[in-house]
Image (cartoon, rainbow, N blue to C red):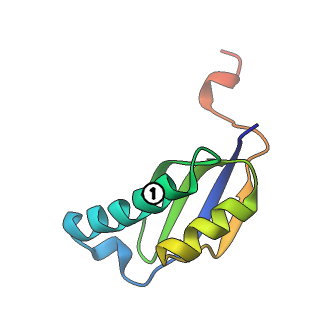
Amino acid sequence: MLRKYVIERNIAGIGDQPAEVLCDVALQSNKVLDELGTGVQWLHSYVVNDRTYCVYLARDESLIREHAARAGIPADSIAEVRSVLDPTMAPS
């Protein structure tokens, strides 16, 4: 069973990088994900000033750490998502 995780990556200046640089990072990440197989999947990332917040599905945290090491990107904090809260959950 795959669980959902949020990964915080501290990368100085990432929010100021042009789309081409972000695409290169995505290509490298995808290459490593292909090598690792079906136990880990990148859903999307939010890029802010000096950080990215990435959402992954994975069998366990160790696969996320292995991906980060092979791709050459940090995984400074990894947290398993326990539940999702959104506006539709509030009664009208």
Q: Report the residue at 27% width, 74% height from top.
A: 17
Q: Nearer the viewer, residue 46 or 62?
A: 62
Pick out the residue farthest to the right. Answer: 82
Q: Report the residue at 65% width, 15% height from top.
A: 92
Residue 16, horizontal then vertical, whole percent: 28, 75
Pick out the residue farthest to the top. Answer: 92
Instruction: Give the quarter of the figure containing the N terminus.
Output: top right
Q: How many marks?
A: 1
Q: Is residue 91 left or right of residue 56?
A: right
Residue 91, horizontal then vertical, whole percent: 71, 17
Residue 10, horizontal then vertical, whole percent: 53, 78
Q: Amino acid at mark 1?
A: Tyr
User: Which element carries disc 1, helix, strand or loop?
Assistant: strand
Report which quarter residue 14 is drawn in.
bottom left
Q: Nearer the viewer, residue 30 or 51?
A: 30
Label 1, residues with CA under 10 Å away: few <14, some 14-19, many ≥20: few
Q: Nearer the viewer, residue 22 or 33?
A: 33
Q: Is residue 57 left or right of residue 43?
A: right
Pick out the residue farthest to the bottom. Answer: 12
**Placement of 14 over or under 84, stated as above or below:** below
Q: Report the residue at 76% width, 39% height from top.
A: 83
**Placement of 17 over or under 37, stated as above or below:** below
Residue 39, horizontal then vertical, whole percent: 65, 47
Q: Report the residue at 53% width, 73% height from top.
A: 70
Tell me the residue that label 1 is attached to: 46
Q: Is residue 83 left or right of residue 12?
A: right
Q: Is residue 9 left or right of residue 59?
A: left
Report which quarter residue 3 is drawn in.
top right
